[in-house]
Every structure is written in C-alpha cells, then in structure tokens.
Image: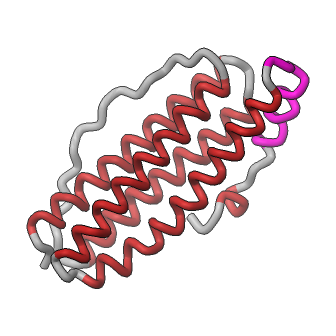
Amino acid sequence: MFDPKLEKALNDQINKELQAWYAYLSMAAFCDTMHLTGFAAFMDLQSREEQMHANRLIRYVLDRGGRVDLLPISSPKDQYKTVLDIFLTSLEQERANTRAIYELYDLAKGVNDYATVAHLQWFLDEQVEEEKVMSDAVGLLKFAGDDKAALLSLNREFGARRPEAAGKS
C-alpha cells in the first residue's frame, strides 16, 4: 500500500501526463491547420508518448494496490504565433514535467518507497531525452529563423520521425 501523500502525488503526476497529452494533441491540430503536416505528425507522436506515460503510471499504481483518481484536465492553448512558439512551449512543458518527477522521486525516497523510486528512474531517464529533443528542435527553429524553405525542410524532417526514434517510450 502507498503512503497517502505518495498515492496523491502519483495521481497528480498522472494528471500532468494527461495534460501534456492534451497539449501536444492541440499543438498537432494547430500545425495541421497551418498545413505543416510533418510538425503535426511529430506533435501527435509526442501526444501518444505522454498518454503512454500516464498509462504506465496508472498501471503501476493499480499493480501496487493503489487507487487511481483521474482528475479533470484543462483546455490547452490552441493558438500559437509560430512553430518556434510551439516548441518553446513544449520545452517549458517538458522542463516543468521533469521538475514534477524530481519532486515525486524525492517524496518516494522520503517515505522509503523504494519500489516507486525504482519505477520513477525510467521517467527520469525519459525526461532527459524529452528535454533534449525539444531543446534541439528549438535550436534548429531559431537557426532557421524566418527562412520558409528551412521551415519546410524541418517540417519534412520532423514528419519522418518514427516511434522507435522517439526513444524507449
């Protein structure tokens, strides 16, 4: 059985993962409306990864005999100025998620729940990868600047990304 604070924190993290899923889904839709189908596909893949992360946590809580309490998720932002704006938002979202997982990890350590500590190691490793992907994308988009040909080239490149290239999700 979980410490009550840890069980609540795990449910809060499930909510954060679902909120990220919803945000990436909205980003994908926005890119699609801009006819940037490569970026849309990339963001759709990101949304599916976040949903998988939530499912992984849900399964863990249930496997440990805990209670899953699915909380409401709010409407995500649905308008952006540029593709760079989308990726800057994504990078900040990933950084916030990393901070939340660190706090969850510290809580699990503090209540001596070593199984949860071990389980969260995968998420810590995943967040390093997620932040790098978004940081690299921001760097490329900044480099491309207002060059539409460069943006279209990046759109093709991001659209070619496959689930296996997205990491160990």
Question: Is 105 or 68 nearer to us in this picture?
Answer: 105
- Taking depth in this image into account, of 114 and 46 the one nearest to the observer is 114
**In the image: residue 76, left or right of residue 42:** left
Quarter of the image holding residue 22? top left
Residue 149 in the figure: left or right of residue 9: right
Magenta span includes 99? no
Q: Residue at x 84, y 36 (%)?
A: 156
Q: x, y percentage for residue 42?
A: 67, 42
Q: In which quadrant will I find the N terminus?
A: bottom left
Quadrant in which the C terminus is drawn: bottom right
- Image spot of residue 14 (x, y percent): 31, 54
Q: Is residue 150 magenta?
A: yes
Residue numbers of the magenta segment: 146-159
Q: Tell me, yes or no, if residue 143 can be seen here.
A: yes
Question: How is the protein colored in the picture?
Answer: secondary structure
Residue 80: image quadrant is top right
Residue 15: give x, y in percent of width and height.
30, 48
